[in-house]
Each structure stands twice: as C-alpha cells, then as structure tokens.
Amino acid sequence: MQGRTAPLISFTPVDNSLSSLKNCQAYINTGMEIATNVALDLLETGCDTVDVESMEPVMLEYAAMDRDLNQYIHAAEEIVRKLKRDPPERVPDLLALVKERYSELQSKNAQADLKKNDRFVQFKEQLREMRRQMGVSQDETTEETFEDVDEEITVTQSQLNLICPITQVKMTNPVKNKVCGHTYQKDAIENMIQNSQLKKKKTRCPKIGCDHADIKIADLIPDIALKRAIDIQNKQKK
C-alpha cells in the first residue's frame, strides 16, 4: 500500500496578502513622520509644552499599530514556512493557525515596549534637540531617568557639530546614521556609499574616532530636528 501523499497547497494568495500588509507599513511610517513634524511645528511656534507632548500618545498609537502589523506578518510567515517544510496530510485551517501564533506573540507584549520603537525614540530625540537648539528648558514636571539623561547627552554631543564630516561645510540636508548616531550631508554620504559599492567595498563612517565600518543607505534617516535648527540659525543671521 502506497503512503498517503500530502495535499497540494497554493501559497500564492497568502504571499500576495503578506505583500499588501507590508505596504501598510509605509502608511504607518508616514503617519509617524507627520505627527513628529506637527510636534516640532508646535515647539517652533512657541506652543505650550502640554500641546507639544500631546503628540506623544499619537506616536505610541502608531507604534502599537506597527508592532501589531509586524507580529501578524511574522506569525503568517512562520506558519507558511512550517507548512512548506512539513506538508500536512490534510489542508490546514491557515487562518486559525496564524491567529493562534499571533495571539502567542501578543501575549508577550508590554506597553513599555512601545517606547522602544525606533521612530518613537527618534521623535523624543528630535524634540530634545529642538528644545536645546531653541534654548527651551524641559518641563520641570517631567521626570527623567538616568538612562534618559545619558541618552540626551549622547544625542546632544552627536548633533552639536553642524559641519559635515565629509564636505567640511555646514550641512543643509542632514541625515543621521541609526547605527552610530553620526550625522552627514545627505548627498555627500549617499555618494560616498555608492562609490564604495562600485568598488565592492564597505563604507566606513567618516566621523573621526567612529569604528562603524559598514554604513548602508537604509540606516540613514532624515535629521528633522537638526534641519530645523539649521534653518532657524540661518534665518537669525539674515
């Protein structure tokens, strides 16, 4: 008697759905970028600290959506990989399996984890830097942990110099390296990376003393707060 063959399962619809879900991440990123810009606009126009900080819950909501979306995608991809590796004897209830795995991932979530979201951390850094550049003190009612203070010192030190380490002139369109925290003129660092890629070499951070030896364009994010600070400084000189 021949062994029972596994049923043929087409994963094309699932792959298409996952692709659509991944596209949704762009909308979440856009929402977080808009919320960040609104907070910086409020700060720049001299609005009350309460108004500025009211954007924090908005950012956390976006961070929660980002986490939920990523976990659902992770659950679906994990189940699909398992089914492709070990085909079942009967066609499984894929949706039920994904929901079960998704629930397992969700059960390990903590509200505090949302504040570790990359874009939320960037949001807080940009507000701190904007306040520093404008000479605005932190709200006296805000309690900062030693970790927050250390992080602020690191951010301040990395943003203090407005001169691009590549061009040696004042930046006009700064981007920040998420890995080492250093900032460069956008077109200068991108050209540097592209030239290295043509030579099949890695790009070392041009900041003196930095040991980060593999900069990627994907690691570069707009330094909105520093850009605004540069613009404000330029206006004051006119």
Image (tube, helix red, strand yellow):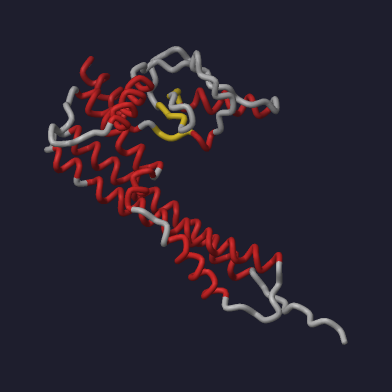
* Residue 23 coordinates in the image, percent (x, y): 49, 56
Residue located at (40% from left, 15% from top): 163
| Tally of marks | 0
Q: Is residue 225 above or below residue 56?
A: above
* Residue 212 coordinates in the image, percent (x, y): 54, 24
Q: Is residue 223 above or below residue 87?
A: above
Q: Check the picture and name the quadrant holding the C terminus.
A: top left
Outermost residue to the right: 1
Residue 201 in sight in this render: yes
Q: In which quarter of the image is residue 130?
A: top left
Residue 166 in sight in this render: no
Q: Quadrant of residue 236?
A: top left
* Residue 191 coordinates in the image, percent (x, y): 56, 25
Residue located at (32% from left, 52% from top): 111
Q: Which of the two residues, 134 or 139, is positioned nearer the viewer here?
A: 139
Instruction: Indicate left or right for 76 with 68 as reference.
Output: right
Q: Is residue 107 above or below residue 228?
A: below
Residue located at (51% from left, 66% from top): 101
Instruction: Indicate left or right for 66 with 44 as reference.
Output: right
Q: Check the picture and name the quadrant holding the N terminus.
A: bottom right
* Residue 65 coordinates in the image, percent (x, y): 37, 57
